[in-house]
Image: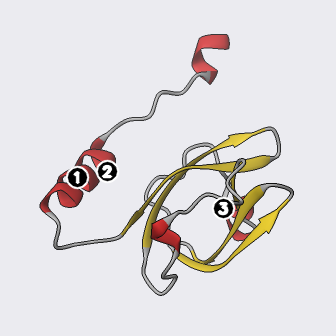
Amino acid sequence: MKIKEVKKENGDKKIVPKKKKPLKLGPIKKKELKKLVLYLKNGADCPCHQLDNLSHHFLILGRKVKSQYLLTAIHKWDKTNKEFKAFMKKMKNHECPTFQSVFK
């Protein structure tokens, strides 16, 4: 994902993505993905070094809380790093649990 801009809003850091290519969508719908805005709760003054240079691609992990999408992790997309490659391989093969089946 490429990042268009990072703003401070009500004590949170608001991250507006530019280009989005989902690795795993989970419960998010493609329609919601077009309007995606991520928030780093209480992160307005957080020195996030990954967000210093917005020209890179990023791997962004998050979750939905009520009507907002919260940023849980961000990492620079680095194809040359062996650990990153191994993590990506695990992410692609990992089956996320669906809690909907529990409540049926």
x and y percentages locating residue 68 in the rendered image:
77, 49
Q: Looking at the rendering, which quadrant does residue 5 occupy?
A: bottom right
Res. 92 mark: 2
Closer-to-camera residue (57/102): 57
Report helix, strand or loop for mark 2.
helix
Q: What amino acid is found at the position of numbered circle 1 in the picture?
A: Lys
- The colour style of the image is secondary structure
Instruction: Classify residue 26 as left or right of residue 66.
Output: left
Q: Which residue is mark 3?
A: 30
Residue positioned 81% across, 38% down in the render: 66
- Give the CA separation, mark 3 to mark 1: 23 Å
Q: Nearer the viewer, residue 11 or 30?
A: 11
Residue 8 drawn at (x, y percent): 77, 67
In the picture, measured across the screen, residue 5 lies left or right of residue 54, that is right
Label 1: element kind: helix
Q: Single out the residue that lies furthest toward the right.
A: 10
- According to the picture, the residue beneath numbered tag 1 turns out to be 89
Amino acid carrying label 2: it is: Lys
Badges 2 and 3: C-beta atoms under 8 Å apart? no
**Labels 2 and 3: the sequence-earlier one:** 3
Report x, y in % for residue 96. 44, 34
User: Dot 3 lies on which element?
Assistant: helix
Image coordinates for residue 88, horizontal then vertical, percent: 27, 55
Q: Give amino acid for label 3.
A: Lys
Residue furthest bottom as drawn = 55
